[in-house]
Image (tube, rainbow, N blue to C red):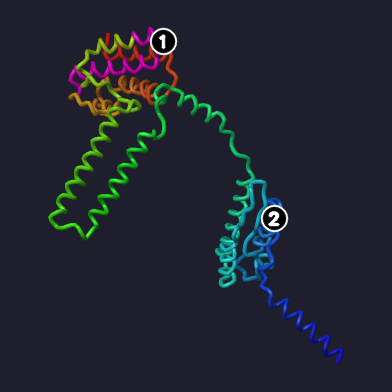
Amino acid sequence: MTRWRTHFLTALLLGAALSCPADSVPPTALTPEQYRSQIDLLNAAAAQLGGSGGATPGALEHLPQSWKLHTDQGDFEISSEGLRRDVRRYNSERNATNAEAIRTRLESLQRDIDDFERPPADDTAVRSELATILAHKEFRDVHGPTWGDRLKRWIFEKLAQFLGRLFRSSAIPNIGKYFVYGLMALAGLALLYILYRSILRDQGFEQVIPTDLPVSAKEWSIWLSEARGAAARGDWRDAVHLAYWAGISFLEQQGFWKPDRARTPREYLRLISPTSEQRETLSVLTRIFELAWYGKREATEDTFSQTLEQLEKLGCR
């Protein structure tokens, strides 16, 4: 009787152990070093694979569902589904291609942990350069939405919701739909008008070319005189800017192209024939201007001197 009771208790304990799901016990979190060691072991096992049909190493056959990592930056979980899928494919067809897929997958996991542990690049110089660019006068008036902007947006949203409910309402007589359509059209026109006025009044909207267009409407000599005045004040960047338009005004007055206020510096350059002797000079002049004006490169007295040299080659004397 005692022996029967002992066998019964043993069977009961074994049944309870088997009935507990294996994944109910949380796996122990690994450190990056421990995770790297496991990947190294799997790499060693994958090196034994080939197209000869040998057995798959046990390390690859008994992969966990995932690896849990505990790092200073937080806890992460890395799935092994892709690797297990590659192993299943290799077990169904043992060839060199499937074996190489397993090794490639492990190399990818190895690179991921290497990239994670690599210290971040020092971006102090980049941040300093960005702060210098944002300190220019062009960005002084740049800001987020003001309370007035938020109020206008709220009003438009409420108006759109109101008109939407009116439009969807089946209680509106057919003759009243035209009134609703008119209100919606007026609201759209009002929105477009406010947007148009906002763009015109925006002080941060920089015009590439001054308002007295076309460029040739102002004599190139006046442009050049203004450039020299800016240079006298030590504003070398504006001096290069004005000197460039002196060259454009000169060529436009010579009939190299028809005036067009919407044209960009690169479009001016493309309008000159590649065989023209002014093509190379304007190319150098455009490059100096773009670096100083758009590229925010520091302009100096030497930069302005180079600009004047190119203007003289064009014939601006």
Q: What stretch of residues is rendered in magenta?
A: 229-257
Magenta segment's dominant SS is: helix
Task: Answer few, some or many: residues within 10 Å of disc 1's Cα (few below 14, many 20 plus, some between 14 and 19).
Answer: some
Q: Residue at x 30, y 21 (%)?
A: 282
The answer to whether mark 2 and mark 1 are in CB contact below 8 A is no
In the image, residue 110 sits, relative to residue 245, either above or below, namely: below
Counting residues from the start of the chain, the first of labels 2 and 1 encountered is: 2
Say which quarter of the image contains residue 211.
top left
Amino acid at circle 2? Leu
Residue 228: horizontal and vertical position, in percent? 34, 9
Disc 2 crowd rating (10 Å Cα; few below 14, some 14-19, many 20+) is some
Task: Point out residue 182 in the picture as x, y percentages from the top left corner.
Answer: 17, 47
Compared to residue 288, the image places residue 164 above or below, namely: below
Residue that extends furthest to the bottom in the rendered view of this protein: 1
Q: How many marks?
A: 2
Distance CA(mark 2)–CA(mark 1): 62 Å
Q: Residue at x 83, y 85 (%)?
A: 6
Magenta-span inclusion, residue 251: yes
- Helix, strand or loop status at disc 1: loop
Q: Which mark is residue 30?
A: 2
Q: Position of residue 64 (x, y in %)?
A: 65, 64
Residue type (three-letter) at the residue carrying disc 1 = Gly
Q: Nearer the viewer, residue 3 or 112?
A: 3
Image mark for residue 234: 1
Give the quarter of the image for residue 307. top left
Quarter occupied by the N terminus:
bottom right
